[in-house]
Every structure is written in C-alpha cells, then in structure tokens.
Amino acid sequence: MNNKGFGLVQLIITIVILAVVGIAAYKSYFTAGQQNLKEAEKMYDNTGQAAVGGKPESVHTRKAKELEGRVFINSVITALKVYEAVNGRFLYTDWTSESKELGVNTAGNQYFKEFSVEKSGSGFLVKVRGSGELEGVVLTSE
C-alpha cells in the first residue's frame, strides 16, 4: 500500500509525545521560578539591610508571589466551569479555604489561603486573599 499522511495510531502517538513534552516543559518552567524566588529571598537575608517594614522586596519577587494567587484563581475557575457543566449552575461560596463540591483547597498554597466565589452579572467573580507576607492583598478574576 502507498499510504500518504498519518494513520490513527501515528496521530495518537504524536499527541501523547507532545503532551508529555508539554507537561515536562511546564513543570521545569515553574520549578525554575520557585528556585529563583528562594535564591532572591536568600540574597535579601544575607545583605543585612533593614527597612522600616522589614526586608526590601523587589517588584519581581512580589509578582512571583502573586503568581501563586493567579494560578490558584485559574484552578478555581476551571473547577467552577466543570461544576456548571455537570450541575447546570454555578456554585457560590463565602471566604473559605476548601470547597469539597468543587474539589479545591488551599493546602498547597503558601501566600493565598482563602478564596470566595461571588455572583457577577451572568457569571461569577473569583477572589483570593493573601496571608502572611501578602496580608491584605486580594486578587480577583471573572
């Protein structure tokens, strides 16, 4: 036979290989970011600098810490969309650290320990609240 193009088996193998490479690249990207964040914090600890409110913090360090909140917001939004697809409605919740209905909790987060889902127009508004070094910071996304 003179087949031209991919067969079904070749297509599935190609998709699996691309998925594995994509997951590996994603993990290495975020692992490197966490290592850089720890190294930056060590640099500040070793300088001996003292500021009125504590150690100085660069814009990049702050953004790296806030990235945890943005990633968590995206996981809550994904869980909400799945919940809405299955149940035909959104699930709204007051400030909490865990939602068993959504299958979401903040156990793995260092800087954002609470979230809420509020009604907004025809959809929802997700908020995450910072704790510890980010006390008082609230990130939102619709």
Image (spheres, rainbow, N blue to C red):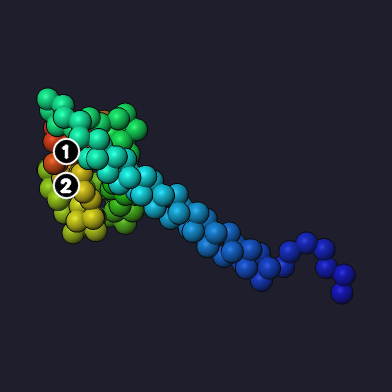
The residue at the point 14 percent across, 41 percent down is: 131
Secondary structure under tag 2 reads strand
Amino acid type assigned to the residue bearing label 1 in the image:
Glu
Residue shown at the point (68%, 68%) measured from the top left: 10
- Residue 98: x, y in percent? 16, 54
Alpha carbon of mark 1 to alpha carbon of mark 2: how far? 12 Å
89 on left or right of 96: right
User: Is residue 48 left or right of 33 when viewed as pictured?
Assistant: left
Q: Amino acid at mark 2?
A: Lys
Task: Determine which quarter of the picture holds residue 49.
Answer: top left
Q: Position of residue 51 (x, y in %)?
A: 16, 26
Mark 2 crowd level (few <14, some 14–19, many ≥20, 10 Å Cα): many
Marks 1 and 2, the one that precedes in the sequence? 2
Are the residues flagged by discs 1 and 2 in contact, CB closer than 8 Å?
Answer: no
Can residue 56 be seen at all in this image of the molecule?
yes
Q: Is residue 135 left or right of residue 78?
A: left
Quadrant placement of the C terminus: top left
Residue 39: x and y, percent? 33, 45
The residue tagged 2 is 113
Q: Which residue is mark 1?
A: 133
Quadrant of the rendered image containing residue 70: top left
Q: Please tell me whether mark 1 sits on a helix, a strand or a loop.
A: helix
